[in-house]
Amino acid sequence: MTDLISSTPTGRGAVERSSRWERAALLVPGLGYVSAFMAVPVLLVLSYVFFQRGRFGGVVYEFTWDNFARAFSPTYRAVLVDSLVIAGAATVLALLIGYPVAYAIAMLPDRLRTIALVLVVIPFWTNFLVRTYAWIVLLSNEGLVNRSLERIGVIEDPLTLLYTRGAVVVGLVYAYLPLMILPLYASISKLDPELREAATNLGASRFKAFRTVTWPLTLPGVLTGCIFVFVPSLGNFIVPELLGGGKFVMVGNVVRDQFLKARDWPFGATLALVLIVVLVALFFVQSRVSRRLSTGGPS
Amino acid sequence: MSDTHVTTPDVEQTTGAMEPLVDIRHVSRRFGAVTALDDVSLTIAENEFFALLGPSGCGKTTLLRAIAGFERPDSGEMLLGGQDLVALPPHRRPLNLMFQSYALFPHMTVEANVSYGLEQEKLPKQEIRQRVGEVLETVGLSTTAKRRPHQLSGGQRQRVALARAVVKRPKLLLLDEPLSALDRKVRSQMQLELKRLQQEVGITFVVVTHDQEEAMSMADRLAVLAHGRVQQVATPVETYRRPANLFVADFIGDSNRFAGRVVDGGLHVPDVGLLPGHPVGDVTGDAHLVVRPEETRLGAPGAGLMEGQVVETQFFGGVSTVAVDVPGHADPVLCAVSGVSTVERGATVSLHWTADAAVVVGGSL
Ligand SMILES: Nc1ncnc2c1ncn2[C@@H]1O[C@H](COP(=O)(O)OP(=O)(O)OP(=O)(O)O)[C@@H](O)[C@H]1O
Ligand SMILES: [Mg+2]
């Protein structure tokens, strides 16, 4: 293979050079937009992390490490850990629900598949706040769930469903499940069914074939889906506020409050930086694992 | 002709006397409007090398997949050693299928691909390693054992797929075009290896191939399929000498064909006259006479069954082919002669053959 490429350096090289320029040209609008409206503001905000808060808000440009000391103080460390646990639980739950659903959709005949995928994304057409409010209606003491359970006689007194950690997790799963299902669906439907058949033909039971062939080959999709759910869950502040009733503070809430209520921009920026570092580390792991699993590229 | 009659009953006795290993009865499978298998019935004897031949899309892969349990027949029965196959889940069937697309596990090395099947049998590690090593040696891939499939050439991948199916030494091996991507030399090595497995290990083979020479030289019997239907099941010699219909005659080997009406002693062809040949089965009315180029003899003008002008001669080493344009017949008539042909282009020649050398068959292309 390598001989083939090097033996025709002129032709091949010329093609690659021109396509490289073309590719670079295609990236210009996207990169331009992202750097102007995303990277620059984010960097500006992050630059506050070494400065102090002004007396009445604003930023005093005097160097300090205090923000970091505070961010890793027990109080905020607990919030961070708690947020990681809640987001992690939401991610695991979304994966457990999403994988079978994505698998089932991938096995549907073509026509039904499109319909099923549309059904998966339909909730996204509704406002996030409205959808989350709907869960209050479902979970409150006089809500649909408690009423139904009372009517069929399973319970006598209403269960406390709302304003619990569970409610927050459920709300996050509900909010981001489509983001789990779509990448999973993409990687499952890409999988050649003959691979599963080959495993079966070689004597593997359905479960064994799944564990040794389907699962490892869809792992990149699993990781993508998990990141798609974990990242917005970790930073989310609407769900903990509405469904957690403010009893469960997540990092997202703290960051929001620092910027909007306490007006401590430097500390808010520091917490945001911590979040970003955690997420970048996750992306790094994901891309490393995906590359190792990927079959097309060099290993 | 006479030796065909000797071989045919012989084979029928052996397959008829023993219980067949595979018994396929009236199996049909439809995909929407396409009938991939249309009332297919076949028996395959224990330790037989059975070839499946037919044009692309005739249902060969579908038949193997049905035997392996990946296509459920719409109707019909399949037995393996007297046991109902359809009731058996695919992973319990004592057979291995080599997929036409190879279906190698992309996330596993060559070695892991080949040992996968043995690991399912829970064999001791030591034995697995030894058997995998042996089979990789046999297919000539010992040095690539640690590579992943995408780092292999097409022919190497095909050999991994072959090794993965063969290493299990099942009762029945179903191979879907196992050697198509290999060069001539490796292919003939692999052919010998497959024959050795058949004889020494006692594996029964069902092999799909596009290569007629391969089918002819390796198979004990072969089935010709067209449009999901079995056209003929017979020994290679029988299919060549006594094709069951025009489709088989045309599909297997080169042939000269004449259209006409069946009469006593052969076929009456308009503008040419009576051509001698024996009918296969009950053919009446419109039919075709088929004669192989090597049975067609050249002669001096004025002597044979028909006359024509030589349009071309081709030398193939051992034999030459002379193409003769016969007035009133669309395609040139081919005639194979041994050595270098002495006739010149443009010369007028006559053609003839004996009744034993030609067959009259029904059916269409
Ligand atoms: N899953 C399927 N869905 C719809 N049609 C199918 C399916 N599998 C096979 N067919 C059709 O059934 C027919 C037989 O296909 P099959 O793959 O058995 O052919 P084949 O003889 O193996 O051909 P080839 O020599 O090209 O491999 C074809 O017309 C094909 O298009
Ligand atoms: Mg095929």
Image (tube, coloured by chain):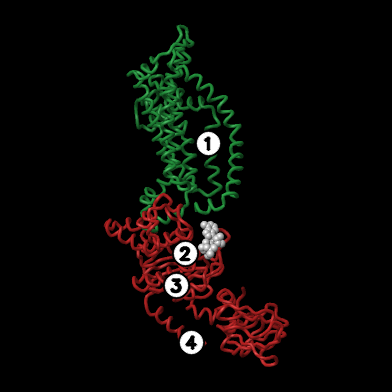
Chain colours: A green, B red
The quadrant in which residue B70 appears is: bottom left
- Using the image, determine if residue A109 lies above or below residue B214: above
The quadrant in which residue A292 appears is: top left
Asked which secondary structure carries label 1, the reply is helix
Asked which secondary structure carries label 4, the reply is helix
Could you tell me if the residues under marks 3 and 4 are in contact, i.e. CB atoms within 8 Å?
no
The quadrant in which residue A219 appears is: top left
Dot 2 beta carbon under 8 Å from ligand 2 = yes
The three-letter code of the residue at mark 4 reads Asp
Quarter in which the C terminus of chain B is drawn = bottom right
Disc 4 to disc 1, how far (Cα)?
Answer: 71 Å
Q: Residue at x 59, y 49 (%)?
A: A10
The three-letter code of the residue at mark 2 reads Asp
Give A183 or A269, whichever is nearer the viewer: A269
* Sooner in the amino-acid sequence: mark 3 or mark 2: 3
Question: Which numbered disc covers residue B3?
Answer: 4
Q: Chain letter of disc 3?
A: B
Could you tell me if the residues under marks 3 and 2 are in contact, i.e. CB atoms within 8 Å?
no
Disc 4 to disc 2, how far (Cα)?
Answer: 31 Å
Question: Which numbered disc covers residue B176?
Answer: 2
Percent x, y for residue B58?
54, 66
Looking at the rendered image, the disc whose residue lies closer to the viewer, 1 or 3, is: 3
* Sooner in the amino-acid sequence: mark 4 or mark 2: 4
Disc 1 residue crowd, few under 14, some 14–19, many 20+, Cα 10 Å: some
The three-letter code of the residue at mark 3 reads Phe
- Residue located beneath label 1 in the image: A121
Q: Chain letter of disc 1?
A: A
Disc 2 residue crowd, few under 14, some 14–19, many 20+, Cα 10 Å: many
